Image (tube, grey):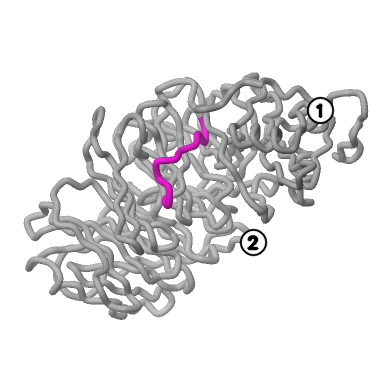
Amino acid sequence: MRNNNTITKTQNKDVFLSGRVFLTPGAQAAFDEASQLPKEFIAKHRKVGWGIVCEADRKENNFSVKEGFRILSVFTLLNFVLLAGLISLVASSAKAQSGVGVKTDLGVYLEGSPPTLPAAGGKLTDPTFGTQIMRVTDQTDGTSFGTAYSYWSTFNSNNTRVLAQADGTAYLYQFDPVLFTLGAKQEMIFPPGSGYTTAEDVVWSAYDPNTLFIHRGAVLYAFNAQEGSYSLVGDLSSQFPAGAYLFQMSVSRNDDVFAFTVRNADYSVWGYAVWKRSTNTIIYSVNTSALDEVQIDKTGRYLVVKTGQQGAGVIEVKVVDLQTQAVTNLTDNAPDFAPGHSDNGNGSVVGEDNWSDRITYRNLATPQVVRTVIQWSTWDVATHISMLADNEDWVLISTYGNSSIFNRELMLVATDGSQRVKRLAHHYSIYNTYEDTPRANISRDGKFIAFTSNWGGSSRRDLFIAKVPADSEQLQPCRRRFTFIIQPVNLRQF
């Protein structure tokens, strides 16, 4: 049946067990109109007759039958309706896989004692997952280094520079993504003038690998890392009370739309605002103290507002469509299950559901429609989420705390709802305070992951970079005519 990882069809034997089969109301209506039965296509699906899928999906299906990933079939009914979305997840065992390498099951992998650390620039191999890890900083640099957060990138647009956060400052390192080596470092110079500034929320330009955006007070600057110089991007001082400053900045993928919390001179929250660089205008602002943070999505059209409020019936998140000015409120619990820790993609958000113990995905155009990315089997999995990669078929999740499963791991999880996982490394950071969390973020090409670790609970923290194994890099998706979402509501079992 298998030859060089190729799966061939068999006429009389199911190649895999698909488990329970569910039918959406829309699919049932299509079958009724065509006067055909689902079992005809289910039988083809089980015998690896995958219909008219594209070549990339056909290859992925071949691989998935062997490894236990998602399988997709696409068929045309007699009335020429395209039936897309016959999806199976080949039995994914909770039994741990043997050997060293990337894991795709849901078993328990104890991290054991942390490997001996090399000096800065040195590398080691994760003893469980086989992933190569570089140590970026060590005791010669200081005592506390790492990432800022999972949605602020450590990597520039082409992975030739990395940003290491430090106590009160930051360092820029040259980085060779081909040889996986670390180069010279330079301390980041803060922008001119007076007023609050920080390196925590600096954002790399989406286009220029030498440019970072930073603010001082309510003034935005661009820092050229190659020249060590600053240029003015925009002065927003007149838009807010005297002494106000910007905080927790995010920027769209075209370097044009900037969003941030605004704080008063006494550090109290004034509210939030969105500024468009190309027109030098504030396109949206709200004066409110009921705020945790805001984040713009990659397209620059949607703003996700975290209110800082939680509880049954409480509005935890607001989604603002900046084009129409429409605001959608999301409740912390049912029916919306607003995203907690989260990150935005292109018109999407992936985040924690604080009530149903899962990670969810939603389109920001229809933010009250939600699907499960992964359902945890225990409430003790704490996570940070990174959607910084260009290919959003997979999301990076870093876990922390003392979970009985997925304990202190870096993992990729499919965003299509198939609950496929690619478990890449243990980060070995023992949680004592927030600063000990990994806050891992992924490079735009999906080839590198930066994370913070105290490596077994030491008194210092360092920045590390994991090189994503080549066979786990994020696959490019097929171009499909349409997609529908299967949800656990309004389904009948077939």
**At 15% from the left edge and 71% from the top edge, which residue is drawn?**
239
Location of the N terminus by quadrant is: top right
Residue type highlighted by circle 1: Ala
**At 67% from the left edge and 53% from the top edge, which residue is drawn?**
480
Find residue 260 and report its horizontal and vertical position in percent.
26, 59
Location of the C terminus by quadrant is: top right
Q: Main secondary structure of the magenta part?
A: loop
Q: Magenta segment, which residues?
A: 364-374
Count neighbours of disc 1 (C-alpha within 10 A) and say few if under 14, some if 14 to 19, many if 20 or more.
Answer: some
Residue type highlighted by circle 2: Val
Is residue 365 found inside the magenta-colored segment of the image?
A: yes
Picture quarter containing residue 74? top right
**At 83% from the left edge and 27% from the top edge, which residue is drawn?**
15
Find residue 405 and report its horizontal and vertical position in percent.
50, 23
Is any atom of residue 338 visible in this view? Answer: yes
Does residue 369 lie above or below 245 as drawn? above
Q: Which residue is mark 1?
A: 43
Q: Are marks 2 and 1 in contact (CB under 8 Å)?
A: no
- For the residues labelled 2 and 1, the Cα–Cα distance comes to 46 Å
Q: Secondary structure at mark 1?
A: helix
Q: Secondary structure at mark 2?
A: loop
**At 39% from the left edge and 63% from the top edge, which residue is drawn?**
300
Q: Which mark is residue 178?
A: 2
**In-front residue for pair 383/113:** 383
Is residue 354 found inside the magenta-colored segment of the image?
A: no
Of labels 2 and 1, earlier in sequence is: 1
Horizontal arrangement in the rendering, residue 102 relative to residue 342 (left or right): right
Number of numbered discs:
2
**In-front residue for pair 53/491:** 491
Does residue 255 lie above or below 199 as drawn? below
Horizontal arrangement in the rendering, residue 490 relative to residue 381 (left or right): right
